[in-house]
């Protein structure tokens, strides 16, 4: 369609809208009309008689107020007394008839339409008739323009204001969204609700397709429904309407075909159904809650329709009568759930409810199961009323089997007494409080165990829990109040968890299981409930979460340990030749040689790397240790050298060491770990503010005060006292009580796992030592460690170099060529003959050919084809007296020496092994063999 045709169509729709407004206000039902012309310009000159009868009158005039009137509807004479010819001939101008006091406003409105490019407007003013009478009219004017937006002429539709009807006000007061559209779906008119709630003005609406006001994905559906409507199919549908801002409003739309002005139009009535949808959702939720509540009932519950067909039963009903959900779907009558001869009881009960009975007081009958077995039952039923009409019934069935048996033995009265006693006993034994509160919030019944009184008297509990809520934890009072209020409005059950403050001020958790009670006519009676003390359960759940968290931490540490073991294997294999060559180089130099210090530093660095790997393996090898005579002074020096780069410069380190202290018997890597952990805790306590960390070491004999603190110490033995103190944040008494517990930590996740001090405590205890702590908040902390001394000397560098010559033939097996080369050179240098193999199978074949040639076998643990332990077993099958030394650089736990000795392994060496340890082990094994 070209632009001219579109403009013509829009202007024609403006005419239709103006005429529709005039008609709605005039009250004409069947106005006569003719089709207009095609050209807007021609229409201004000869618009044709669009209205030839009724009480709506049409004018068309040029764009000047005093310009000629080009058209007047033929019925104008009955309104003004002038004929249409008197206007179109120029004898009378329309402006001359406007009452002088209203003329300025009329002209101002015309000018405003030109300046603001307004297509239509409405106004009321006074006209003077030919006989001089003045009266008020309503004028609906449209502005016709050419395609360049130049004003061509005005068309006005006027009615006598005194003849206005209430049709248009009524049209505009309807809350529904009303649209009137033509056959093509283009909007002709709408009511105020569209403007006020959807945000579209009438000018914006006119000429738009009705599909525009629905979502893009719905427009085809709307189009199809309008097409179907034109062939006589009125329809309703749910499709959201879109506001001007794009917000979707849920709506139900009804479209119907109508006739107006001799043309077919479509009336669209869209109703906002937001509240209806919310109500439907609330109904669904209410039904879900009803189903959940019925499943909580310990008794069979049934629903039936007006014909007595079962529409619902809970799981207890399925279990009691044996019908499956599929049976119910096919149809089960309530009248078949009793024996035939008693069906009249159920039928009479059903009919009485149809007749208006509210609720049965209980009817005994014989219930019939699907498998034709029976049981005595008591039936309570109530009618389902919808819209004031009987719609079915609900019933609860109580199995009286046990009751009937008891009645036959004891008689009815004695049974009732017993049931009352049992009920009272049951209530008395419930570990909580059973209560009933009436509609005035007064406690009418309270039965509770002594433990649950929470130090209150019964009177205090009754007065302060329910009416005043004084003993409820302040933050939980609104929760309880809201719950009680909701129970007053609808019958339902609820389980609420909140806190109660005991008389001594402690807080306990309680679970309040309660249900509201209503009379048959719907009056709220009160609340029945049971209060349980669940404090221990809450604590258990919290502890469970804590333990799960700790388990996850432990699993992460185990994973790290497994990874560390693999790294240790490769790293120790690298260190083995490095340490070996360094020791060989050092042993060939005099102490005055410039290279002597270099090789010494290489050896010390290798030892530090070895110890570092040993520390990493602490988590992958828990409980494993290799005690040796060690100097604590040397370990302190090594530890501080390791820690110093990570300690902030704001922390001063003071060493107060007595270098005359004797040695101890312990695993050096574990003592290193103790010192590092304690020093780390100390400097972390001073990271923010700085301070002084003091490390002390002295040898003591326990005095009476120390013996009183640690009775396990021996009075006449000597101990090393290692003290590590800081001037940091300190700890309170509660924290100090828990610092040695596994996983307890006051640090953030990235700084602490809670394992450090528990490991320290375990290591010290394993060497018959003790640890104490003294601390005050903001005053710092001091740890003291006591370890028994020994008189042996630690292995020194000079001892390391003092290796004697040996003799014999050794078979060495290792898959690392670098390790093979250093072992060959070390053993050859001190007089041993050595044959090496990189394959266990090759070594086994070599030994099988000449078993008497070899005095000793040294084998690695982890190798391709066969492990060192498996190789040892095969070699012992050939020579039962063959001594075997096992070497390993892996971090995994090794079997005990007692189990290793079964396959001939008499010594276990950890890589990297220094020359002195290796030679000592080789000579010890060979000498033992010769002996």
Image: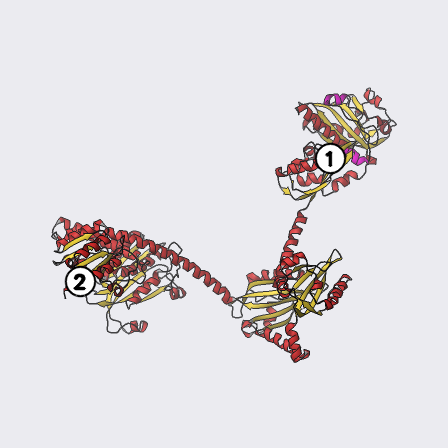
Residue 625 or 497: which is nearer the viewer? Answer: 625
Residue located beneath label 2 in the image: 925
Which residue reaches farthest front? Answer: 849
Residue 37 or 376: which is nearer the viewer? Answer: 376
Q: Secondary structure at mark 2?
A: helix
**Residue 133 highlighted magenta (yes or no):** no
Q: Residue at x 74, y 65 (%)?
A: 349
Q: Quadrant of residue 326?
A: bottom right
Q: Secondary structure at mark 1?
A: helix
The answer, for residue 601, to whether it is visible in the render is no
Report x, y in % for residue 616: 30, 56
Q: Is residue 388 left or right of residue 839?
A: right
- The number of numbered discs placed on residues in the rendered structure image is 2
From what the image shows, is residue 326 above or below residue 243? below
Q: Is residue 389 left or right of residue 400?
A: right
Range of residues picked out in magenta: 20-47
- Disc number for residue 608: none
Report x, y in % for residue 98: 80, 28
From what the image shows, is residue 773 above or below residue 832? below
The local crowd at label 1, few if under 14, some if 14 to 19, many if 20 or more residues have their Cα within 10 Å, is some
The answer, for residue 201, to whether it is visible in the render is yes
Q: Quadrant of the N terminus?
A: top right
Question: Which comes before the other along the chain, label 1 or label 2?
Answer: 1
Report x, y in % for residue 535: 51, 66
Report x, y in % for residue 394: 69, 62
- Disc number for residue 230: 1
């Amino acid at each position: 369609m070209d632009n001219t045709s579109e403009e013509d169509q829009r202007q024609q729709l403006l005419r239709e809208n103006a005429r529709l407004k005039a008609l709605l206000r005039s009250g004409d039902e069947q106005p006569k009309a003719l089709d207009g012309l095609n050209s807007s310009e021609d229409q201004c000159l000869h618009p044709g008689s669009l209205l030839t009868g009724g009480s709506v009158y049409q004018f068309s005039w040029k764009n000047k107020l005093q310009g000629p009137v080009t058209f007047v509807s033929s019925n104008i004479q009955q309104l003004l007394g002038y004929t249409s010819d008197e206007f179109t001939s120029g004898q009378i101008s329309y402006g001359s008839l406007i009452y002088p006091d209203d003329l300025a406003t009329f002209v101002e409105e015309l000018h405003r339409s030109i300046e603001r490019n307004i297509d239509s407007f409405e106004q009321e003013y006074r006209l003077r008739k030919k006989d001089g009478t003045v009266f008020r009219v309503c004028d609906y004017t449209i502005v016709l323009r050419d395609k360049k937006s130049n004003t061509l002429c005005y068309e006005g539709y006027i009615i006598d204001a005194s003849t206005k009807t209430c049709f248009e006000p009524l049209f505009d007061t309807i809350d529904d969204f009303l649209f009137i559209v033509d056959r093509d779906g283009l909007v002709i008119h709408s009511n105020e609700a569209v403007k006020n709630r959807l945000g579209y003005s009438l000018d914006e609406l006119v000429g738009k397709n009705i599909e525009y006001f629905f979502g893009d994905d719905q427009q085809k559906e709307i189009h199809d429904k309008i097409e179907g409507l034109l062939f006589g199919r009125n329809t309703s549908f749910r499709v959201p309407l879109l506001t001007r801002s794009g917000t979707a409003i849920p709506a139900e739309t009804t479209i119907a075909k109508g006739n107006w002005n001799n043309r077919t139009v479509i009336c669209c009535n869209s109703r906002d159904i937001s509240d209806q949808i919310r109500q439907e959702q609330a109904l669904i939720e209410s039904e879900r809650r009803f189903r959940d509540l019925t499943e909580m009932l310990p008794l069979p519950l049934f629903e039936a329709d007006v014909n007595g067909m079962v529409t619902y039963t809970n799981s207890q009903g399925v279990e009691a009568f044996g019908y499956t959900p599929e049976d119910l779907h096919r149809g089960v009558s309530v009248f078949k759930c009793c024996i035939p001869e008693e069906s009249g009881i159920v039928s009479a009960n059903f009919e009485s409810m149809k007749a208006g009975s509210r609720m049965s007081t209980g009817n005994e009958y014989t219930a019939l199961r699907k498998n034709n077995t029976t049981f005595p039952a008591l039936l309570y039923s109530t009618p389902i009323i919808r819209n004031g009409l009987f719609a079915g019934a609900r019933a609860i069935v109580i199995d009286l089997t046990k009751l009937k048996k008891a009645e036959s033995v004891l008689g009815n009265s004695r049974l009732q007494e017993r049931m009352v006693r049992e009920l009272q006993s049951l209530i008395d034994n419930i570990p909580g409080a059973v209560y009933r509160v009436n509609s005035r919030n007064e406690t009418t019944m309270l039965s509770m165990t002594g433990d649950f009184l929470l130090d209150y008297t019964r009177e205090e509990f009754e007065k302060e829990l329910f009416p005043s809520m004084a003993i409820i934890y302040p933050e939980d009072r609104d929760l309880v109040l809201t719950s009680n209020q909701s129970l007053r409005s609808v019958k339902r059950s609820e389980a609420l968890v909140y806190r109660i403050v005991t008389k001594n001020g402690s807080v306990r958790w309680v679970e309040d299981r309660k249900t509201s009670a209503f009379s048959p006519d719907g009056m709220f009676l009160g609340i029945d409930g049971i209060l349980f003390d669940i404090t221990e359960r809450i604590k258990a759940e919290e502890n469970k979460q804590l333990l799960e968290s700790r388990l996850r931490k432990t699993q992460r540490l185990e994973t790290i340990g497994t990874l560390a073991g693999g790294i240790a294997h490769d790293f120790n294999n690298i260190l083995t030749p490095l340490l070996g060559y360094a020791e060989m180089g050092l042993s060939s130099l005099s102490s005055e040689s410039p290279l002597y210090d270099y090789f010494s530093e290489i050896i010390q660095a290798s030892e530090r790397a070895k110890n570092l790997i040993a520390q990493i393996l602490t988590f992958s090898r828990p409980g494993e240790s290799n005690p040796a005579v060690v100097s604590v002074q040397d370990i302190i020096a090594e530890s501080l050298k390791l820690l110093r780069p990570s300690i902030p410069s704001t922390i001063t380190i003071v060493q107060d060491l007595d270098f005359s202290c004797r040695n101890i018997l312990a695993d050096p890597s574990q003592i290193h770990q103790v010192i590092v952990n304690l020093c780390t805790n100390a400097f972390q306590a001073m990271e923010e503010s700085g301070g002084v960390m003091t490390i002390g070491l002295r040898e003591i004999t326990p005095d009476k005060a120390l013996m009183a603190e640690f009775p396990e110490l021996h009075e006449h033995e000597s101990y090393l006292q290692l003290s590590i103190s800081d001037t940091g944040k300190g700890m309170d008494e509660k924290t100090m009580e828990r610092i040695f517990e596994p996983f307890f930590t006051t640090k953030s996740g990235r700084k602490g796992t809670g394992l450090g001090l528990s490991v320290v405590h375990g290591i010290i205890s394993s060497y018959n030592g003790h640890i104490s702590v003294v601390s005050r908040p903001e005053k710092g902390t001091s740890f003291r460690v006591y370890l028994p001394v020994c008189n042996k000397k630690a292995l020194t560098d000079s001892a390391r170099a003092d290796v004697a010559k040996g003799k014999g033939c050794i078979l060495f097996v290792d898959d690392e060529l670098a390790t093979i080369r250093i072992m060959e050179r070390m053993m050859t240098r001190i007089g041993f003959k050595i044959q090496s193999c990189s394959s266990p199978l090759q070594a086994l074949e070599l030994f099988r050919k000449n078993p008497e040639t070899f005095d000793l076998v040294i084998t690695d643990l982890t190798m391709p084809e066969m492990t060192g332990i498996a190789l040892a077993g095969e070699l012992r099958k050939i020579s039962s007296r063959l001594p075997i030394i096992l070497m390993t650089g892996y971090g995994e736990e090794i079997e005990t020496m007692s189990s290793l000795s079964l396959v001939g392994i008499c010594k276990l060496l950890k890589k990297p092994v220094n020359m002195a340890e290796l030679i000592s082990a080789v000579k010890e094994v060979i000498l033992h063999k010769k002996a």
